[in-house]
Image: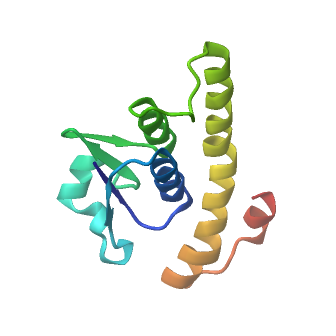
Amino acid sequence: MKIYGFPTFNLTKVLLTAEELGLDYDYIALDPAKGEHKTPEHLQRHPLGKVPVLEHEGDYLYESAAICRYLSRISDSRLYSGDAKAKAKIDQWIDFGSLHIGKWLASYFFEEIIKTKFYGGSVDHALLAEA
């Protein structure tokens, strides 16, 4: 099992899930400054060239919440319930994190780090206030 990525909130979710489950994996660090996430090899793993990506049993999965769910399902996990209603509650919070908290963290990360360090742009304070 391999996990491809570079430091983002979404990669952190996947790595913490794998660690909590005690899964054996190799972390493959990609360098975004060198465009390693946009190489033909990585575009075969993820058609948009994003991270994280999980490689398992010859297949690739992307989208951090889907990867976390998958990791929980393939292990003897105490993170995922067998009860349908409890599972729906877990899914609800995973989706909340991805769709809301993840959006705000991504906005913050882009404005404070990517935009200023790599593009020399100025921070959009209205966007940060919303985040």
Is 50 displayed left or right of 117 in the figure? left
Which residue: 18% across, 57% down? 40
> Residue 54: x and y, percent?
34, 47
Quarter of the image where one finds residue 128: bottom right
Give me the residue at 48% from left, 46% from top: 64
118 and 8: which one is in front? 8
Query: Can you see residue 47?
Result: no
Whether residue 16 is visible, yes or no, is yes
Left or right: 20 with respect to 87? Answer: left
Q: Looking at the image, which residue is at 61% across and 14% down?
A: 84
- Above or below residue 64? Residue 123 is below
Rendered position, 48 above or below 9:
above
- 131 is higher (above) or lower (below) than 79: below
Q: Nearer the viewer, residue 86 or 102?
A: 86
Question: What color scheme is it?
Answer: rainbow
User: Residue 129, located in which quarter of the rendered image?
Assistant: bottom right
- With respect to residue 120, does 112 lie above or below? above
Residue 90: x %, y % from top left: 64, 30
Residue at the (47%, 53%) spot, across then down? 19
